[in-house]
Amino acid sequence: MSERIVGKVGRVVGPVVEAYDVSGVEMLELVFVGDERLVGEIVRINRDRAWIQVYEDTTGLRPGTPVYGQGEPLSVELGPGLVGSIYDGIQRPLDMIRARSGDFVAKGVHIPALDRDREWHFVPAIAGGKHVEGGTVIGTVQETEIIEHCVTVPPDLEGELIEIAPEGDYKIDRPIARLKRDDAEFELKLFQKWPVRVGRPYRKRLPHNEPLITGQRVLDTLFPVARGGVVVVPGGFGTGKTMIQHALAKWCDANIVVYIGCGERGNEMTEVLLEFPKLMDPRTGKYLMERTILIANTSNMPVAAREASIYTGITIAEYYRDMGYHVAVMADSTSRWAEALRELSGRMEEMPADEGFPAYLPTRLAEFYERAGMVETLSGKLGSITTIGAVSPPGGDFSEPVTQHTKRFVRAFWALDKQLANARHYPAVSWLDSYSEYTEDVGEWWDQQTSGEWQQLRSEIMSIMQREARLERVVKLVGADVLPDSQRLILETAKIFKTAFLQQHAYDEVDAFCVAEKQYRMLKIIVTFYKLASEAIKKGATLVGLKKLGVMRDIMQMKYEYRNEDASKLQELQTKLEEAIGEYAATFE
């Protein structure tokens, strides 16, 4: 990093600083502004003037103070120590800042993202004298008990590995290898830097054919997302966006979770910070923080850093993807990020578009979401990033610009319903307004797990729910009593499906997370009830009589009474249901 004075502060407009007498700078170059050396980024240049987006509070900044150019773009440090850490939007470690400056982030605090004093046990994976390319794994470090960290050659380097350190303990900034390219030599360390706004390269993008299992039945069964997919979760205030993001971060079967609290209320982020270190991962039996990285940029923190936070998070996710891990990125919420974009655009006096948002809002959204995907990495491994972005449309209006533009770049839409949330039906995902274009992509995987029945069962239950929605309009006018039993059965089956399947108790030890096999068997039981009951009604049975069968109570309680490891025992309930309805129907023959 070559620091030099590149200009002086001329005008301060909130988080935007206009500098004059500027020379020798580039777009998106990292700069330090003023005597307090506030972190900023150049976002516009016009002759000898430059506009700087400052990521800290500019109160007290005076015209005439110097601007220091750093000669590089805003970048993040990537290496051992990321997992389990808590950063702000520009990757400053909040725990270390608290130790230095107290409960509030002081201005001009510059602390390396990765601990320079901690030693890591490095195990070389390659011998010296070999030709290596970007992405080649040269060694490993055990970052946590469940994450083996691969030390790789930076993507933009290649050459002959002329020396590599022996196995041992090394600090993160100590050279562990030397690489020669042409006549130049480069030192490789345990960490590398990468610009946040530039996607890390890979060999090729791969198709989506495997689901990300979230453990939430309404998502996995009705609106699945594939590994490497992109999802938007829109919903008004109080519909449970953050709750869904928390549940996915806790239970989804990703190797690494990057949770970006982008402009959310401090108490919601506090809940994450307090809960996650205490929660156990159900798959590994280790603490959840051993696979989680938190980016905390709450609503009371500088607005410009909120704009950078999602790029910081997705760049860290790409780094672990390149090691061959499956990464899930939770962005909560992209509406607050877009609002930061709007404020900064207004400060720079740019022409506004819809509802005051800048005209480049769709472009920025696309740049973020397109960095997800299932890929073959430079080292030949398989890795993925699944991005799940929450949107907070004002008043729950899904026609507002952020929601509408986001829909253009995602393939799954989990719409949250205010009425369901008010009725305490969680997750409050609307089965009428939501959709997933990944259903066919992951259908083959599900069919392999369920003897080829999943797609058929899902299609049948979706048909029942659509018919129930049409019947509800009639019921509101004339009541349910006027309907024949065949139509009332549709309403009853939909009620069972909503209560016994879609509704999920986030704080129940058994029901908080549901494995794929249990979801399939529960769905099959409900569809079987509808089919057998329909046949029984045709023979003369009544819906009232069917509802009195003792097995109905077992169906309503099956999500609590059958643990995930006992999912195969649901077959006994299936047999019990078939026998009970069969015996009842036989009395009408």
Image (cartoon, rainbow, N blue to C red):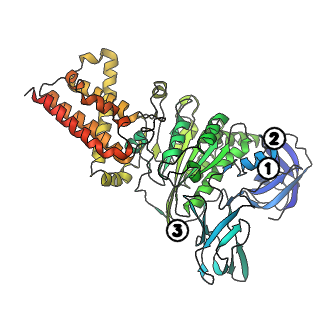
Disc with the residue nearer the chain's start (2 vs 1): 2
SS class, disc 2: strand
- Residue 498, image x, y percentages: 37, 31
**Residue 302 visible in the picture:** yes
Q: Please, what secondary structure does the residue beneath circle 3 have?
A: loop
Instruction: Give the x, y percent position of residue 149.
Output: 59, 63
* Towards the viewer: 495 or 579: 579
> In the drawing, does residue 61 fall left or right of residue 508?
right
Figure check: 70 above or below 391: below
Q: Which mark is residue 13?
A: 2
Whether pointer 2 and pointer 3 mark residues with C-beta atoms closer than 8 Å, the reply is no
Name the secondary structure under disc 1. Answer: strand
Q: Residue 28: which quarter of the image?
A: bottom right
Quickly name the residue at label 3.
Answer: 203
> Which one is in front in this view, the residue at disc 3 or the one at disc 1?
3
In the displayed orientation, state which residue is furthest to the left. 589
Q: Amino acid at mark 1?
A: Trp
Residue type, mark 2 in image:
Val
Q: What's the residue at 57%, 34% (across, down)?
A: 393
Find the distance from the CA under tag 2 to the CA under tag 1: 10 Å
Residue beneath the point at 81% across and 52% down: 50
Q: In front here: 260 or 336?
A: 260
Q: Using the image, tell me which numbered label, if any, was put on residue 51.
A: 1
> In the image as oriented, which residue stretches furthest toward the right?
64
* Left-right relation of 565 to 411: left
Task: Say few, some or many: other residues with alpha carbon within 10 Å of mark 3 (under 14 / 14 to 19 / 20 or more).
Answer: few
